[in-house]
Amino acid sequence: MRKISLLTVLLIWLSVCACCTAPQPTVEYPPIDQLLIDETTFPEGWIATEPNWTHPPRAPWSGPTKMVEYIDRGFYTRSGDGAAAGITIRQFDSPRAAAREYEHRIDVTFRDEEWNTPWVAPDGLLFESPEADQYRYGCSEVFGQPGCAYVAQYGVYTVYFGIGIYDANVITYTDLLPVFQAIDERMMLALDSE
């Protein structure tokens, strides 16, 4: 009799707990490689590398940053000189973790050091992202070479895009506007799935 009443109490407790915990809806994000831009967003003559798509160590949750996966891709001119660029997209387990990574990336990317000029938005590169939760872009001269960066958070994703310009005849600041817009459009795919 005592076993039956303990079993009854246990079953009632389990059913109450099951009713109180609503299942969390899972979000289906698009494959991360679909979020990458390609060379068509650059002026004619640019080439994109194959994506480097890997899971971080101990995936799917990688340490305190809670990174799920990341992908990156490089871009360069056919001649191999003039400019080089790269994009990295990181997915995290929550928007909060992505926001922490965004703040870290902003601090590292836009740090004023003795070897670079202050980061500014140059004339000809006026961009506003209607999609990003937060973003920053700017250009600087690093060791005398012009370079630009764009860092953004889109929900559970962070994006870093950087370019070093060695020859202004290959790409200009105004040529970067379509690149930033293409990043924004691709990341909209991820936001539409939330």
Image (cartoon, rainbow, N blue to C red):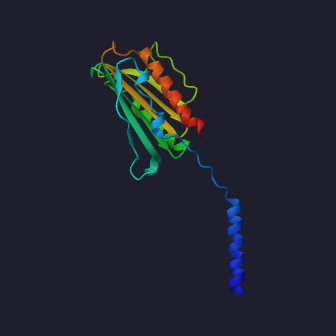
**Residue 83: percent from left, percent from top:** 32, 21
**Residue 34: percent from left, percent from top:** 48, 35
Q: Quadrant of the N terminus?
A: bottom right
Left or right: residue 2 versus residue 124 is right
Could you say which is closer to the camera, residue 38 or residue 85?
Answer: 38
Q: Residue at x 34, y 23 (%)?
A: 164
Q: Residue furthest bottom?
A: 1
Left or right: residue 3 versus residue 194 is right
Q: Classify 71 as above or below 117.
A: below
**Residue 13: percent from left, percent from top:** 70, 70
**Residue 46: percent from left, percent from top:** 35, 22
Could you say which is closer to the camera, residue 46 or residue 97?
Answer: 46
Q: Residue at x 68, y 63 (%)?
A: 18
Q: Quadrant of residue 166?
A: top left
Q: Classify 118 as above or below 67.
A: above
Q: Classify 133 as above or below 5.
A: above
Q: Is residue 191 visible?
A: yes
Left or right: residue 21 versus residue 42 is right
Q: Quadrant of the C terminus?
A: top right
Q: Classify 13 as above or below 121.
A: below
Total numbered labels placed on residues in the image: 0
Q: Is residue 104 visible?
A: no
Could you say which is closer to the camera, residue 26 or residue 127?
Answer: 26
